[in-house]
Image (cartoon, rainbow, N blue to C red):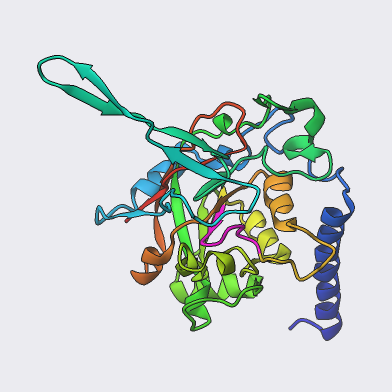
Amino acid sequence: MTHPHERTARWVIVAAATAITLTTVASGQSDKWYPSKWGADDQRGAANRITPAKVMQAKGLITQGRIYQLGRVYEAGMPMPATRHFSLHIPQAYVMGGKNQGVYHDEVFSGEIGQIGTQFDGLGHFGQGELFYNGNRRTEFAQPGGLTRLGIENVGAIFTRGVLIDVARLKGVAQLEGGYEITVADLKNALARQRVDIGAGDVVLIHTGWGALWMKDNAKFMGSAPGIGVAAAQFLADSEVTVVGADTSAVEVGPNPDKDLVAPVHQLLITHNGIYLHENVATEELARDNVYEFAYIFSPLRLKGATGSPGNPIAVR
Protein backbone atom coordinates (compact mmCIF):
# COMPACT_ATOMS: atom_id res chain seq x y z
CA MET A 1 0.00 0.00 0.00
CA THR A 2 1.29 3.45 -0.89
CA HIS A 3 1.85 5.70 2.11
CA PRO A 4 -0.25 8.93 2.05
CA HIS A 5 2.91 11.03 2.07
CA GLU A 6 4.17 9.15 -1.01
CA ARG A 7 0.88 9.77 -2.80
CA THR A 8 1.12 13.46 -1.94
CA ALA A 9 4.71 13.62 -3.19
CA ARG A 10 3.76 11.99 -6.48
CA TRP A 11 0.87 14.42 -6.94
CA VAL A 12 3.23 17.33 -6.34
CA ILE A 13 5.64 15.97 -8.96
CA VAL A 14 2.83 15.59 -11.54
CA ALA A 15 1.49 19.04 -10.76
CA ALA A 16 4.96 20.54 -11.02
CA ALA A 17 5.55 18.85 -14.38
CA THR A 18 2.27 20.23 -15.70
CA ALA A 19 3.17 23.68 -14.45
CA ILE A 20 6.57 23.47 -16.13
CA THR A 21 4.91 22.51 -19.42
CA LEU A 22 2.52 25.45 -19.22
CA THR A 23 5.30 27.81 -18.20
CA THR A 24 7.51 26.64 -21.05
CA VAL A 25 4.77 27.25 -23.60
CA ALA A 26 3.86 30.62 -22.11
CA SER A 27 7.32 31.99 -21.47
CA GLY A 28 8.98 31.07 -24.73
CA GLN A 29 11.65 28.78 -23.30
CA SER A 30 13.10 26.80 -26.15
CA ASP A 31 16.00 24.72 -24.86
CA LYS A 32 14.09 21.52 -24.03
CA TRP A 33 12.27 20.49 -27.18
CA TYR A 34 14.87 20.49 -29.95
CA PRO A 35 16.76 19.02 -31.68
CA SER A 36 14.16 16.42 -32.56
CA LYS A 37 14.49 12.78 -31.53
CA TRP A 38 14.66 12.08 -35.29
CA GLY A 39 17.68 14.30 -35.76
CA ALA A 40 18.47 17.98 -36.13
CA ASP A 41 17.68 17.95 -39.87
CA ASP A 42 14.34 16.12 -39.61
CA GLN A 43 11.34 17.72 -41.33
CA ARG A 44 8.75 14.94 -40.93
CA GLY A 45 8.25 14.79 -37.18
CA ALA A 46 5.78 12.17 -35.97
CA ALA A 47 5.20 10.96 -39.54
CA ASN A 48 8.40 8.99 -38.97
CA ARG A 49 6.30 6.67 -36.79
CA ILE A 50 4.45 5.35 -39.86
CA THR A 51 6.54 2.23 -40.25
CA PRO A 52 5.81 -0.79 -42.48
CA ALA A 53 4.69 -2.63 -39.34
CA LYS A 54 2.24 0.18 -38.56
CA VAL A 55 0.84 0.04 -42.09
CA MET A 56 0.33 -3.72 -41.79
CA GLN A 57 -1.41 -3.26 -38.44
CA ALA A 58 -3.80 -0.79 -40.05
CA LYS A 59 -4.39 -3.14 -42.97
CA GLY A 60 -5.50 -5.81 -40.50
CA LEU A 61 -8.27 -3.53 -39.23
CA ILE A 62 -10.05 -3.60 -42.59
CA THR A 63 -12.58 -6.38 -42.17
CA GLN A 64 -15.78 -4.98 -43.72
CA GLY A 65 -14.54 -2.87 -46.61
CA ARG A 66 -16.61 0.10 -45.47
CA ILE A 67 -15.29 3.59 -46.25
CA TYR A 68 -16.06 6.69 -44.18
CA GLN A 69 -15.29 10.05 -45.73
CA LEU A 70 -13.92 12.36 -43.05
CA GLY A 71 -13.53 15.52 -45.10
CA ARG A 72 -15.98 18.40 -45.29
CA VAL A 73 -17.16 19.73 -48.65
CA TYR A 74 -15.13 22.75 -49.76
CA GLU A 75 -17.68 25.39 -50.69
CA ALA A 76 -18.48 29.06 -50.49
CA GLY A 77 -19.77 30.07 -47.08
CA MET A 78 -18.05 27.35 -45.08
CA PRO A 79 -16.78 28.35 -41.61
CA MET A 80 -13.37 29.98 -41.52
CA PRO A 81 -11.63 32.87 -39.77
CA ALA A 82 -12.38 36.26 -41.30
CA THR A 83 -8.84 36.64 -42.66
CA ARG A 84 -9.05 33.45 -44.75
CA HIS A 85 -11.02 32.99 -47.92
CA PHE A 86 -12.27 30.50 -50.48
CA SER A 87 -13.35 31.26 -54.03
CA LEU A 88 -13.96 28.94 -56.97
CA HIS A 89 -15.17 30.04 -60.41
CA ILE A 90 -15.79 28.29 -63.73
CA PRO A 91 -14.62 30.95 -66.21
CA GLN A 92 -16.19 29.49 -69.37
CA ALA A 93 -16.67 26.38 -71.44
CA TYR A 94 -13.78 25.58 -73.76
CA VAL A 95 -14.83 24.19 -77.12
CA MET A 96 -12.21 21.89 -78.63
CA GLY A 97 -13.96 21.45 -81.96
CA GLY A 98 -13.98 18.37 -84.12
CA LYS A 99 -16.92 16.33 -85.30
CA ASN A 100 -17.35 14.92 -81.79
CA GLN A 101 -17.92 18.46 -80.37
CA GLY A 102 -15.55 18.13 -77.45
CA VAL A 103 -15.98 20.72 -74.72
CA TYR A 104 -14.53 21.05 -71.25
CA HIS A 105 -14.54 23.17 -68.08
CA ASP A 106 -11.71 24.38 -65.86
CA GLU A 107 -11.91 26.15 -62.53
CA VAL A 108 -10.10 29.14 -61.10
CA PHE A 109 -9.41 28.78 -57.39
CA SER A 110 -8.34 31.40 -54.90
CA GLY A 111 -7.88 30.73 -51.20
CA GLU A 112 -5.55 29.80 -48.36
CA ILE A 113 -5.47 26.28 -49.68
CA GLY A 114 -3.75 24.63 -46.70
CA GLN A 115 -5.76 26.31 -43.97
CA ILE A 116 -9.44 26.13 -44.92
CA GLY A 117 -12.06 23.40 -44.63
CA THR A 118 -10.81 20.03 -43.44
CA GLN A 119 -7.20 21.08 -42.95
CA PHE A 120 -4.05 19.19 -42.07
CA ASP A 121 -1.64 21.44 -40.17
CA GLY A 122 1.98 20.95 -41.16
CA LEU A 123 5.07 21.55 -39.04
CA GLY A 124 5.67 24.93 -40.63
CA HIS A 125 2.24 26.20 -39.63
CA PHE A 126 2.72 27.03 -35.96
CA GLY A 127 5.67 28.10 -33.85
CA GLN A 128 6.79 29.68 -30.62
CA GLY A 129 8.21 33.15 -31.01
CA GLU A 130 10.80 32.86 -33.79
CA LEU A 131 11.19 29.08 -33.45
CA PHE A 132 9.30 26.28 -35.14
CA TYR A 133 9.60 22.49 -35.06
CA ASN A 134 13.13 21.23 -34.53
CA GLY A 135 14.37 24.72 -33.66
CA ASN A 136 13.96 26.11 -37.17
CA ARG A 137 14.04 29.91 -37.05
CA ARG A 138 11.16 31.56 -38.88
CA THR A 139 13.25 34.29 -40.50
CA GLU A 140 15.48 31.64 -42.06
CA PHE A 141 12.84 29.48 -43.76
CA ALA A 142 9.59 31.45 -44.16
CA GLN A 143 9.76 33.14 -47.55
CA PRO A 144 7.01 34.88 -49.58
CA GLY A 145 7.24 32.15 -52.21
CA GLY A 146 6.85 29.33 -49.69
CA LEU A 147 8.58 27.68 -46.76
CA THR A 148 12.09 26.49 -47.57
CA ARG A 149 11.89 24.02 -44.67
CA LEU A 150 8.99 22.21 -42.97
CA GLY A 151 6.79 22.45 -46.06
CA ILE A 152 3.85 20.05 -46.22
CA GLU A 153 5.52 18.15 -49.08
CA ASN A 154 7.83 16.53 -46.50
CA VAL A 155 5.07 14.64 -44.67
CA GLY A 156 4.43 11.79 -47.08
CA ALA A 157 1.39 9.51 -47.23
CA ILE A 158 -0.16 8.36 -43.96
CA PHE A 159 -1.70 4.90 -43.69
CA THR A 160 -2.01 3.88 -40.08
CA ARG A 161 -4.27 2.81 -37.25
CA GLY A 162 -6.95 5.35 -36.36
CA VAL A 163 -8.83 5.63 -33.09
CA LEU A 164 -11.98 7.68 -32.46
CA ILE A 165 -12.44 8.99 -28.92
CA ASP A 166 -16.10 9.88 -28.47
CA VAL A 167 -16.09 12.32 -25.55
CA ALA A 168 -19.61 13.51 -26.33
CA ARG A 169 -21.01 10.02 -25.79
CA LEU A 170 -18.95 9.61 -22.64
CA LYS A 171 -20.66 12.70 -21.25
CA GLY A 172 -24.09 11.54 -22.44
CA VAL A 173 -24.66 14.52 -24.73
CA ALA A 174 -24.96 15.05 -28.45
CA GLN A 175 -22.62 18.01 -28.28
CA LEU A 176 -20.14 19.27 -25.71
CA GLU A 177 -20.53 22.87 -24.59
CA GLY A 178 -18.43 25.62 -26.12
CA GLY A 179 -15.30 26.25 -24.07
CA TYR A 180 -15.35 22.80 -22.43
CA GLU A 181 -11.80 21.57 -21.80
CA ILE A 182 -11.40 17.87 -22.50
CA THR A 183 -9.24 16.38 -19.75
CA VAL A 184 -6.90 13.42 -19.48
CA ALA A 185 -9.56 11.66 -17.43
CA ASP A 186 -12.10 12.24 -20.22
CA LEU A 187 -9.80 10.64 -22.78
CA LYS A 188 -8.92 7.68 -20.55
CA ASN A 189 -12.51 7.08 -19.50
CA ALA A 190 -13.78 7.21 -23.08
CA LEU A 191 -11.08 4.80 -24.21
CA ALA A 192 -11.97 2.44 -21.37
CA ARG A 193 -15.66 2.60 -22.25
CA GLN A 194 -14.85 1.89 -25.90
CA ARG A 195 -12.37 -0.88 -24.94
CA VAL A 196 -9.59 0.47 -27.12
CA ASP A 197 -6.20 1.95 -26.41
CA ILE A 198 -3.82 4.24 -28.25
CA GLY A 199 -0.18 3.76 -29.13
CA ALA A 200 2.78 4.95 -31.13
CA GLY A 201 2.01 5.99 -34.69
CA ASP A 202 -1.77 6.14 -34.21
CA VAL A 203 -4.08 8.86 -35.44
CA VAL A 204 -6.47 10.00 -32.71
CA LEU A 205 -9.73 11.70 -33.74
CA ILE A 206 -11.87 13.31 -31.05
CA HIS A 207 -15.65 13.54 -31.45
CA THR A 208 -17.25 16.45 -29.60
CA GLY A 209 -20.45 16.81 -31.61
CA TRP A 210 -19.39 20.32 -32.60
CA GLY A 211 -19.34 19.36 -36.27
CA ALA A 212 -23.15 19.37 -36.34
CA LEU A 213 -22.91 23.16 -36.50
CA TRP A 214 -20.96 23.11 -39.80
CA MET A 215 -22.82 25.19 -42.43
CA LYS A 216 -25.78 25.42 -40.03
CA ASP A 217 -24.50 27.87 -37.43
CA ASN A 218 -21.09 29.01 -38.63
CA ALA A 219 -20.87 31.85 -36.14
CA LYS A 220 -21.26 29.49 -33.20
CA PHE A 221 -18.94 26.92 -34.82
CA MET A 222 -16.16 29.51 -35.04
CA GLY A 223 -16.79 30.86 -31.54
CA SER A 224 -16.03 29.29 -28.19
CA ALA A 225 -15.51 25.57 -28.82
CA PRO A 226 -14.79 22.40 -26.87
CA GLY A 227 -11.40 20.76 -27.21
CA ILE A 228 -8.40 19.27 -25.50
CA GLY A 229 -6.34 21.26 -23.01
CA VAL A 230 -2.60 21.22 -22.43
CA ALA A 231 -2.69 18.26 -20.04
CA ALA A 232 -4.70 16.12 -22.47
CA ALA A 233 -2.38 17.14 -25.30
CA GLN A 234 0.62 16.07 -23.22
CA PHE A 235 -1.05 12.70 -22.60
CA LEU A 236 -1.42 12.22 -26.36
CA ALA A 237 2.15 13.36 -26.99
CA ASP A 238 3.40 10.89 -24.36
CA SER A 239 1.43 8.19 -26.19
CA GLU A 240 3.56 9.00 -29.28
CA VAL A 241 0.68 9.47 -31.69
CA THR A 242 1.22 10.88 -35.18
CA VAL A 243 -1.90 12.99 -35.71
CA VAL A 244 -4.56 14.47 -33.43
CA GLY A 245 -7.79 15.56 -35.08
CA ALA A 246 -11.28 16.67 -34.10
CA ASP A 247 -14.59 17.90 -35.45
CA THR A 248 -13.71 21.47 -34.41
CA SER A 249 -11.75 24.26 -36.06
CA ALA A 250 -8.73 24.10 -33.74
CA VAL A 251 -8.80 20.68 -31.96
CA GLU A 252 -7.89 22.48 -28.72
CA VAL A 253 -10.31 24.18 -26.36
CA GLY A 254 -11.12 27.74 -27.29
CA PRO A 255 -10.56 30.05 -25.68
CA ASN A 256 -7.98 28.52 -23.37
CA PRO A 257 -9.09 28.63 -19.72
CA ASP A 258 -5.77 30.32 -18.91
CA LYS A 259 -6.26 33.80 -20.37
CA ASP A 260 -2.49 34.22 -20.66
CA LEU A 261 -2.21 31.34 -23.17
CA VAL A 262 -3.21 31.42 -26.84
CA ALA A 263 -3.25 28.13 -28.77
CA PRO A 264 -0.79 26.34 -26.41
CA VAL A 265 -1.89 22.90 -27.67
CA HIS A 266 -0.75 23.83 -31.18
CA GLN A 267 2.67 24.65 -29.74
CA LEU A 268 2.90 21.55 -27.58
CA LEU A 269 1.91 19.12 -30.33
CA ILE A 270 3.18 20.69 -33.55
CA THR A 271 6.14 22.80 -32.43
CA HIS A 272 7.49 20.73 -29.55
CA ASN A 273 6.59 17.19 -30.63
CA GLY A 274 6.17 17.22 -34.42
CA ILE A 275 2.61 15.88 -34.09
CA TYR A 276 0.19 17.00 -36.78
CA LEU A 277 -3.29 18.43 -36.25
CA HIS A 278 -6.26 17.54 -38.46
CA GLU A 279 -9.00 20.12 -38.04
CA ASN A 280 -12.66 20.21 -39.12
CA VAL A 281 -12.80 16.43 -39.50
CA ALA A 282 -16.25 14.92 -40.08
CA THR A 283 -16.44 12.39 -37.24
CA GLU A 284 -20.21 12.07 -36.90
CA GLU A 285 -20.64 8.91 -38.98
CA LEU A 286 -17.88 7.10 -37.11
CA ALA A 287 -19.51 8.09 -33.81
CA ARG A 288 -22.96 7.07 -35.06
CA ASP A 289 -21.74 3.58 -35.99
CA ASN A 290 -19.54 3.14 -32.90
CA VAL A 291 -16.45 2.79 -35.08
CA TYR A 292 -13.62 3.32 -32.63
CA GLU A 293 -10.77 1.57 -34.47
CA PHE A 294 -10.07 1.75 -38.19
CA ALA A 295 -7.48 2.27 -40.90
CA TYR A 296 -6.85 5.99 -41.41
CA ILE A 297 -5.65 7.03 -44.85
CA PHE A 298 -4.58 10.50 -45.88
CA SER A 299 -2.01 11.83 -48.31
CA PRO A 300 -1.36 15.58 -47.96
CA LEU A 301 -1.08 17.40 -51.27
CA ARG A 302 2.57 17.84 -52.21
CA LEU A 303 2.37 21.62 -52.17
CA LYS A 304 5.99 22.69 -51.98
CA GLY A 305 6.50 25.13 -49.14
CA ALA A 306 2.88 25.11 -47.95
CA THR A 307 1.88 25.26 -44.28
CA GLY A 308 -0.86 22.65 -44.55
CA SER A 309 -3.05 20.66 -46.89
CA PRO A 310 -6.71 20.30 -47.79
CA GLY A 311 -8.12 16.92 -48.66
CA ASN A 312 -10.56 14.16 -47.83
CA PRO A 313 -9.13 11.76 -45.23
CA ILE A 314 -10.88 8.41 -45.04
CA ALA A 315 -11.44 5.77 -42.43
CA VAL A 316 -11.78 2.18 -43.62
CA ARG A 317 -13.35 -0.47 -41.41
Total marks in image: 0
| Left or right: residue 17 compared with residue 157 | right
Q: Is residue 152 visible?
A: yes
**Residue at the farthest top position:** 98
229 in magenta: no
Q: Position of residue 194 (x, y in %)?
A: 44, 72
Query: What's the residue at 74%, 66% (across, down)?
Result: 256
Determine which quarter of the picture holds residue 22.
Answer: bottom right
User: Quick one: 191 or 142, which is closer to the camera?
Assistant: 142
User: Quick one: 80 or 284, which is closer to the camera?
Assistant: 80
Magenta stretch: helix, strand or loop mostly: loop
Query: What's the residue at 45%, 71% (across, down)?
Result: 195
Q: Position of residue 25 (x, y in %)?
A: 82, 54
| Left or right: residue 147 compared with residue 159 | right
Q: Which residues are magenta?
A: 244-252
Q: Position of residue 157 (x, y in %)?
A: 46, 36
The C terminus sits in image quarter = bottom left
Determine which quarter of the picture holds residue 298.
Answer: top left
**Residue at the farthest left position:** 99
Determine which quarter of the picture holds residue 56.
Answer: top left
The N terminus sits in image quarter = bottom right
